[in-house]
Amino acid sequence: MARLLFEKTGRSVWISHLDLMRLFQRTFKRAGMNLKHTQGFNPRPSVSIALPLSVGVESCCELLDFELEGQAVSCDEIRDRLNSALVAGVRVLAVYEECRKIGQIAYLDCEVALEYDAGIPQGCEDKLSALFAREQLLVEKKGKNGVTVQNIAPMIRSLYLRREDEHVLVLAARVCCQNPTLNPAQLTAAICCYLPELAPDHSKCRRIEIYDTNETVFR
């Protein structure tokens, strides 16, 4: 089993998780590399992506595990051949064979850009800093089993704010991403719930890096 690190940016953020899986399956085939298939009545290509990404979210730290069928291809060649066949916005950054278990992933660095058409409200940074310093922040989360309420405060490892310009305030945070999982979009939801006067006109999320339980970069 090998693993590749890839980014998903630009217009490609609108590709769903399932379509992204199919995209990579077709890309391996176009690049002349055959994937191994699972056994059984319904064989499937041996491809899996860790931490499925929500539609509309950018990332530069996505991981995909795969296994080739009876081929000896170097990691650099796999990267180059895939990149020559991939769509714009999806790019393989690295390929490697030493793979740790995905279950060891614990934290995620993310950035949420809060956009204010009329300019960042006065006192916004202080109010948001105080909000995310609370011991309890109850936010709704939609899932397969309906809507649940999560206390996201314990899942925020660290958080700081920086101004990108007079209209954009970036919320940079390190959050739990497995058992439990905090979706970065819930940070915006918390603002809308507790400080509706500071709700942004638009917001964009981006994954930056992933870590293990010791907060060491995970690969």
Image: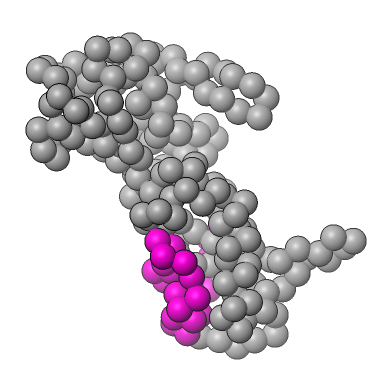
Magenta stretch: includes residue 192: no
Magenta stretch: includes residue 99: yes
Please tell me which residue is depicted at 57% across the width and 50% down the height of the picture.
Answer: 17
**6 above or below 194?**
below
Please tell me which residue is depicted at 23% across the width and 32% down the height of the picture.
Answer: 115
| Res. 216 visible in picture | no
Using the rendered view, name the quadrant where residue 27 is placed: bottom right
Can you give x and y, in whole percent of width and height, for residue 54 in the image? 49, 42
How many dots with numbers?
A: 0
Can you give x and y, in whole percent of width and height, for residue 153 in the image? 38, 21
Say which of 116 and 213 sits in front.
116
Please tell me which residue is depicted at 22% across the width and 36% down the height of the picture.
Answer: 170
Please tell me which residue is depicted at 47% across the width and 84% down the height of the picture.
Answer: 77
Q: Quadrant of the C terminus?
A: bottom left
Say which of 219 and 31 sits in front.
31
- Which range is magenta? 76-102
Using the rendered view, name the quadrant where residue 122 is placed: top left
**Left or right of 34, for residue 212:** left
Can you give x and y, in whole percent of width and height, for residue 13 in the image? 43, 50
Q: Quadrant of the N terminus?
A: bottom right
